[in-house]
Image (cartoon, helix red, strand yellow):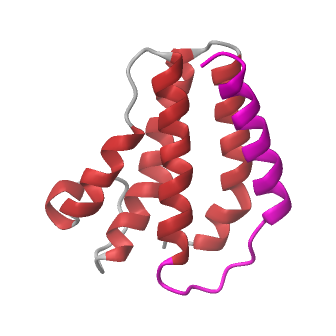
Amino acid sequence: MFDLQWIEDRFWIWVHYGATKLGRGELFETISFLTYLRETVLGPLAARRVGAIPRGVRHLEAIAPEEARNILATLSGYDRHEAGRALLATVDLYRRWSDADGAVVERRHHAEKLAMQYLHDVIDQGC
């Protein structure tokens, strides 16, 4: 079962983790981590938006084609700037899609603020 509160409780920690990898120049780790976020967060949210069973990114192009096109922005080649942009796109989709259906979730606003500040600092320092 997909638990949006479970995702929210971890998402901003994950964003900080991805920013840490990006800041260290660990691009393979950052790219791999973006894949993890697509499979764990964005794919299930996209499926949920269209009333499908949340199963990572499996069959996403067929069951949620518009959402799959939006997820393209979270792809990154081996490039610091692209990886930073992809992390920001991941956050943007998470914010839009996790709020879209009115689910009652206790938001971790303080963690969000800190994670986003750190991500922007990392991006501004070298991406």
Residue at (37%, 34%) from the top-left corner? 75
Q: Is residue 14 left or right of residue 78?
A: right
Q: 42 and 79: which one is in front? A: 79
Q: Answer with the quarter of the image where residue 16 lies.
A: top right
Q: Which residues are magenta?
A: 100-127
Q: Is residue 17 left or right of residue 4?
A: right
Residue at (69%, 25%) from the top-left corner? 124
Q: Answer with the quarter of the image where residue 59 lies.
A: bottom left
Does residue 10 lie above or below 63 as drawn?
A: above
Residue at (79%, 65%) from the top-left corner? 109
Q: Is residue 101 left or right of residue 55?
A: right
Q: Position of residue 64 (x, y in %)?
A: 23, 65
Q: 81 and 12: which one is in front? A: 81
Residue furthest front as drawn: 124
Q: Answer with the quarter of the image where residue 46 lies.
A: bottom left
Q: Position of residue 96 (x, y in %)?
A: 50, 67
